[in-house]
Image (tube, grey):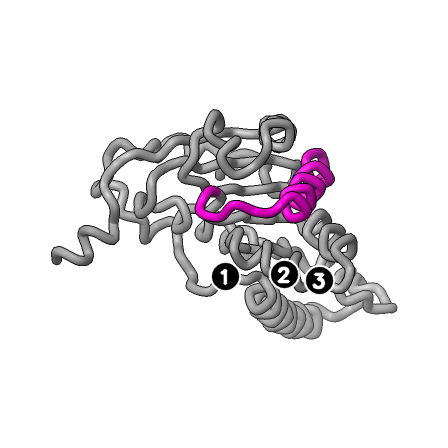
Amino acid sequence: MMSFSELWRHFRLLSEPEGLPPDKAAFLEEFLRIEYAKREQKRIASLLRISGIKRIKLMHDFDWAFNPKIPREKIMEFMQTEWLQRPANLVLIGPAGVGKSHLATALCHDALLKGRQTVFAGLFDLTARLARAKSIYTLIDYYARVPVLCLDELGYLIPNKEQADALFQIISKRSETATTIVTTNLIPSQWGKIFDTTTASAILDRLSLNGRFITLEGRSYRSRKQTS
């Protein structure tokens, strides 16, 4: 929680708070605190609208008991690092339905609540945007600069060479400046199925820098819903 002096500086008030009578100082502090909360709510709502997150998923809603092999401690360990202050990469690997996208969305939502601009993009949507872009370089620069970027469902679509090169440029430019989260159904040795060998190796090399690769195993949550 911000102190009164921090709130005063945040709103860039011209005078100094030290000379205020205690009752006026208390009133003004409460007013500034409420105004600050309103502004933060509006900012977070704006960040959420442009994030690409279609459905909010929260970490505490994840059913860890359904798939006990999923390494909860590794996910929590990542959350406890300074991944929003320093560049960090996280690759979640596993078959369809084990919760990769849920965990990635929850991490992105956590970043939003902490005021970090975030973009959550499925690989299909991202390649479509690249194909439609009037200036592919402008789009690459945009994705390269976002503080937190999640590339969801890598492995279900084979990008063409131009799109693969753009993905490499995005990940490469981000590798030492921002956080990238990737969800995929392919283990690293299989990335040659969607990229040529050189590009796959280069992308993995960039993601390995300040990166963690976490494998998720277990049953599909979707199959549970269909049988329930």
Q: Amino acid at mark 1?
A: Ile
Residue 181 at x, y percent in the picture: 54, 42
Looking at the image, do the residues carrying marks 2 and 3 touch, with CB atoms under 8 Å apart?
Answer: yes
Mark closer to the observer (3, 1): 3
Label 3 or label 1, whichever comes before in sequence order:
1
Residue that numbered label 3 is attached to? 133
Residue 217 at x, y percent in the picture: 30, 34
* Residue 221 visible here: yes
Q: Which residues are magenta?
A: 155-177
Q: Amino acid at mark 3?
A: Ala
Looking at the image, do the residues carrying marks 3 and 1 touch, with CB atoms under 8 Å apart?
Answer: no
Left of 226 or right of it: where is 58? right
Label 2 or label 1, whichever comes before in sequence order:
1
Mark closer to the observer (2, 1): 2
Majority SS type along the magenta span: helix
Residue furthest to the left? 228
Left of 42 or right of it: where is 177? right
